């Protein structure tokens, strides 16, 4: 096991199921409120007040769902890979729980990204699906999510399932840069990235600002979903602990 002396104290607090259950309970209402405000405000802004695209008209508005879901699908997988590495190196069961809890959420985001991309592709490319590098790599990401979920369901031993899921998450993380840079490495139909940290957005502010609000809202939604699933997983795995029995008796 790796040396733990250099790690900060909060790192080990995160490894405590009881502490994580308590802190997520305090954070959940705030993230839920932020999710409702950001997604409701972003949806109204993007659908009713953002101008139509001069080429695509109103059909471009699907990017307000497509882009956030695609970004979140990749971010969730990277979180799983980090959790998998922590679980393998430091043997922290909370990391295993995070990986398992994040997988269904990330998979749903990948499905939403692929579905909205297909809806956008039909009027734009004339086809629901093309074997474009970006689309194909996103489909592979969905299969990786499904593979991790299948491992957790098929392997009864929680420790073995966690190790197998962590290995697959770490191996599959190589697909993330392929998704990101596929439009630059190969000649693809998919348009370049909408947001780049090093460049000014190509869209006018009244189009990319509501998109930014939606992206942040999706991240808050992910946080809410992950914390809720994580709390359920903690209760299930720690059901024999005295603090869980006391909590359930109070309820």
Image: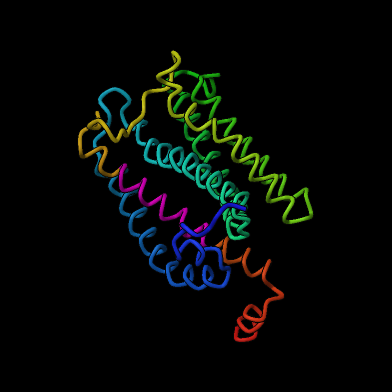
Q: Which residue occupies the extreme bottom position in the image?
A: 250
Give the percent coordinates (x, y) of residue 168.
65, 39
Q: Which residues are magenta?
A: 211-227
Q: Is residue 54 left or right of residue 43?
A: left
Q: Say which quadrant the C terminus sits in.
A: bottom right
Report the predominant secondary structure element of the magenta stretch.
Answer: helix
Identify the image's colour scheme: rainbow, by chain, secondary structure or one colour: rainbow
Give the percent coordinates (x, y) of residue 81.
55, 43
Give the percent coordinates (x, y) of residue 32.
42, 63
- How many marks the image carries: the answer is 0
Instruction: Relative to 175, say whether 238 is above or below.
Output: below
- Quarter of the view holding residue 174: top right
Viewer-proximal residue among 176 and 39:
176
Q: Is residue 136 left or right of residue 210?
A: right
Viewer-proximal residue among 215 and 16:
16
Please report the residue visible at 47 percent of the width from the left and 24 percent of the height from the top.
122
Give the percent coordinates (x, y) of residue 62.
40, 36
Instruction: Relative to 192, say whether 27 is above or below.
Output: below
Queried whether the magenta region covers residue 214, the answer comes back as yes
Please report the residue visible at 48 percent of the width from the left and 39 percent of the height from the top.
74
Please report the residue visible at 50 percent of the width from the left and 67 percent of the height from the top.
13
Queried whether the magenta region covers residue 250, the answer comes back as no
Instruction: Relative to 238, say whether 130 is above or below.
Output: above
């Amino acid at each position: 096991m790796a040396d733990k002396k250099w790690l900060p104290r909060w790192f080990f607090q995160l490894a405590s199921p009881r502490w994580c259950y308590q802190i997520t309970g305090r954070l959940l209402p705030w993230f839920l409120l932020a999710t409702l405000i950001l997604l409701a405000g972003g949806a109204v802004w993007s659908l009713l007040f953002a101008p139509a695209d001069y080429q695509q008209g109103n059909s471009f508005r699907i990017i307000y769902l497509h882009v956030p879901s695609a970004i979140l699908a990749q971010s969730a997988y990277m979180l799983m890979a980090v959790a998998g590495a922590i679980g393998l190196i430091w043997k922290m069961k909370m990391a295993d729980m995070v990986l398992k809890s994040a997988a269904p959420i990330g998979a749903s985001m990948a499905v939403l990204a692929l579905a909205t991309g297909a809806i956008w592709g039909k009027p734009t490319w004339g086809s629901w699906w093309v074997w474009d590098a970006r689309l194909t790599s996103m489909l592979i990401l969905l299969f990786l999510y499904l593979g991790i979920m299948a491992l957790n369901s098929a392997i009864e031993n929680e420790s073995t399932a966690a190790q197998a899921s962590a290995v697959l998450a770490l191996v599959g993380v190589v697909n993330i840069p392929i998704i990101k840079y596929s439009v630059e490495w190969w000649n693809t139909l998919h348009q370049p990235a909408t947001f780049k940290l090093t460049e000014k957005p190509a869209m006018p502010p009244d189009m990319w600002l509501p998109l930014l609000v939606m992206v942040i809202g999706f991240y808050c939604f992910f946080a809410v979903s992950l914390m809720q699933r994580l709390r359920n997983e903690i209760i299930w795995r720690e059901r024999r602990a005295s603090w869980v029995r006391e909590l359930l008796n109070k309820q």
